[in-house]
């Protein structure tokens, strides 16, 4: 079903997700249609926060016809959205009649004429606009509607599919329960995909994990590493069948990835799934690929020059700016994420998907050299020490050779590889 069909079917609210291997030109064309209708019929009429920003930038409900038009809207940081109350779409019969979808306006008029307003609210308006669940991101409550949860479950199912998780797997989630995005997306995803799942405490008993015999572990970096270390130190078979680790909640760094591979064995694949505060669904690494896949039917992702907020070209470093597309509940346009990255819109060589990928820019040297030291057969152990000397950062690495003798050959080989 195309985005345009979804819009007609839902009175202006896009609820579906584009295919993962659509032609980029088709994706851009449908994003343009979706954005035009979304801002005109949803965001501007029903969001006090975004309406004020759009008006201040000289953008009326009919002025946003393509993603390029949003460049006129100054980005906002997550700390500037307040408590999140004004982010929620709040339709009223007067705004529906003046600016909302003509189809929905006619149905409201008809329902009022026949005294069926409550029925229309329950069957049509509430699933699109009324938050039934809330997640909390850096102190801001983000409302999720029935349609939002359905969309999140489908995005999550595709996340698991790209990670190589199948219905025959068993997932052990070691996530803090409650109001966090990764918790909601994992539970929705496994339910939609039909994958057996057990949600365990952040520090689960190894006996419980042994009984579960998981093939996939999902959780925050510190919790997953602690579980793997406990299994190794106690010589427990709890994680012996694990082939995939899904690290959520934080951007996966190479230190965590290499540590988990060392603890679980080199055959275990460690993949990240993460999004900055305010983004409505986790971006996700696929099996064997690079970068984090985004979801073009559910968001507009731009990489901009932080000085001018103008979009930069593909493979050019900048700051990621995010806009909701088709979500109900809480909505924000042109959100500064604070993430430095490049946008890769080429087809993924690993999974074949055409969804654009965010490739975060490394913030420090350990991400560059840690995998090389971990994988080198001549290195038994190593430790890095970062300090400041004469006003400049200095990194000293101590290496323990795995074989006795003069380390000159090892140092020469490492020098060649690290170049």
Image (tube, rainbow, N blue to C red):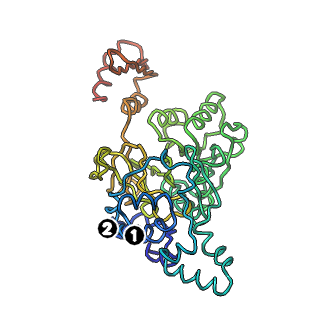
Q: Nearer the viewer, residue 276 or 333?
A: 333
Where does label 2 land, which residue?
25
Task: Name the mark on residue 107.
Answer: none
In the rendered structure, are the residues bearing label 1 and label 2 in contact, judged by CB atoms less than 8 Å apart? Answer: no
Q: Nearer the viewer, residue 418 or 329?
A: 329
Residue at the far top: name it: 406
Gap in angstroms between the C-alphas marked 1 and 2: 17 Å
Residue sitting at x 69%, y 38%: 204
Q: Position of residue 404 (x, y in %)?
A: 41, 14
Q: Position of residue 41 (x, y in %)?
A: 47, 71
Q: Position of residue 144 (x, y in %)?
A: 59, 59
Dot 1 surroundings within 10 Å: few (below 14), some, or many (20 or more)? many
Q: Nearer the viewer, residue 370 or 164?
A: 370
The C terminus lies in quadrant = top left
Quadrant of the rendered image containing residue 234: top right
Task: Tell me if residue 1 can be seen.
Answer: yes
Where does label 1 land, which residue?
36
Nearer the observer: mark 1 or 2; the answer is 1
Q: Is residue 206 left or right of residue 25?
A: right
Question: Looking at the picture, does residue 59 appear above or below residue 304?
Answer: below
Q: Secondary structure at mark 1?
A: helix
Q: Position of residue 102 (x, y in %)?
A: 49, 80
Dot 2 surroundings within 10 Å: few (below 14), some, or many (20 or more)? few
Residue sitting at x 49%, y 44%: 79
Task: Tell me if residue 271 can be seen.
Answer: no
């Amino acid at each position: 079903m195309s985005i345009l069909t979804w819009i007609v079917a839902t009175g202006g609210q896009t609820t579906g997700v584009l295919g993962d291997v659509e032609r980029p030109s088709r994706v851009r064309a449908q994003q343009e249609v979706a954005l035009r209708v979304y801002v005109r019929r949803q965001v501007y009429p029903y969001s006090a926060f975004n309406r004020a920003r759009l008006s201040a930038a000289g953008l009326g409900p009919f002025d946003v016809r393509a993603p390029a038009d949003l460049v006129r809207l100054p980005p906002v940081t997550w700390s500037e959205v307040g408590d999140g109350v004004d982010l929620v779409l709040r339709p009223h019969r007067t705004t529906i009649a003046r600016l909302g979808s003509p189809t929905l306006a006619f149905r409201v008029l008809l329902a009022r004429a026949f005294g069926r307003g409550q029925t229309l609210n329950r069957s049509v308006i509430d699933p699109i606009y009324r938050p039934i669940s809330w997640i909390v991101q850096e102190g801001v409550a983000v409302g999720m509607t029935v349609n939002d949860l359905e969309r999140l479950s489908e995005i999550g199912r595709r996340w698991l599919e790209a990670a190589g998780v199948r219905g025959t797997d068993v997932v052990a989630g070691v996530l803090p329960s409650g109001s966090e995005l990764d918790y909601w997306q994992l539970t929705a995803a496994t339910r939609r995909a039909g994958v057996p799942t057990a949600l365990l405490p952040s520090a689960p008993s190894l006996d419980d994990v042994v009984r579960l015999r998981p093939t996939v572990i999902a959780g925050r970096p510190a919790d997953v590493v602690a579980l793997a270390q406990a299994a190794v130190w106690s010589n427990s078979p709890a994680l012996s069948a694990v082939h995939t680790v899904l690290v959520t909640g934080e951007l996966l760094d190479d230190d965590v990835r290499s540590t988990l591979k060392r603890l679980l064995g080199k055959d275990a694949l460690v993949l990240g799934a993460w999004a900055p505060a305010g983004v409505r669904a986790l971006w996700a690494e696929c099996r064997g690929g690079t970068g984090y896949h985004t979801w073009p039917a559910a968001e507009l992702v731009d990489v901009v020059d932080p000085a001018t907020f103008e979009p930069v070209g593909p493979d050019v470093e900048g700051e990621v700016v995010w806009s909701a597309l088709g979500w109900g509940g809480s909505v924000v346009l042109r959100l500064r994420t604070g993430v430095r990255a490049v946008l890769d819109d080429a087809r993924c060589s690993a999974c074949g998907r055409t969804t654009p990928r965010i490739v975060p820019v490394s913030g420090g040297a350990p991400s560059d050299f840690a995998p090389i030291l971990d994988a080198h057969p001549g290195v038994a152990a190593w430790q890095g020490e970062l300090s400041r000397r004469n006003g400049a950062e200095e990194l000293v690495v101590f290496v323990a050779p795995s074989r006795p003798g003069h380390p000159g050959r090892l140092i020469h080989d490492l020098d060649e590889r690290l170049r």
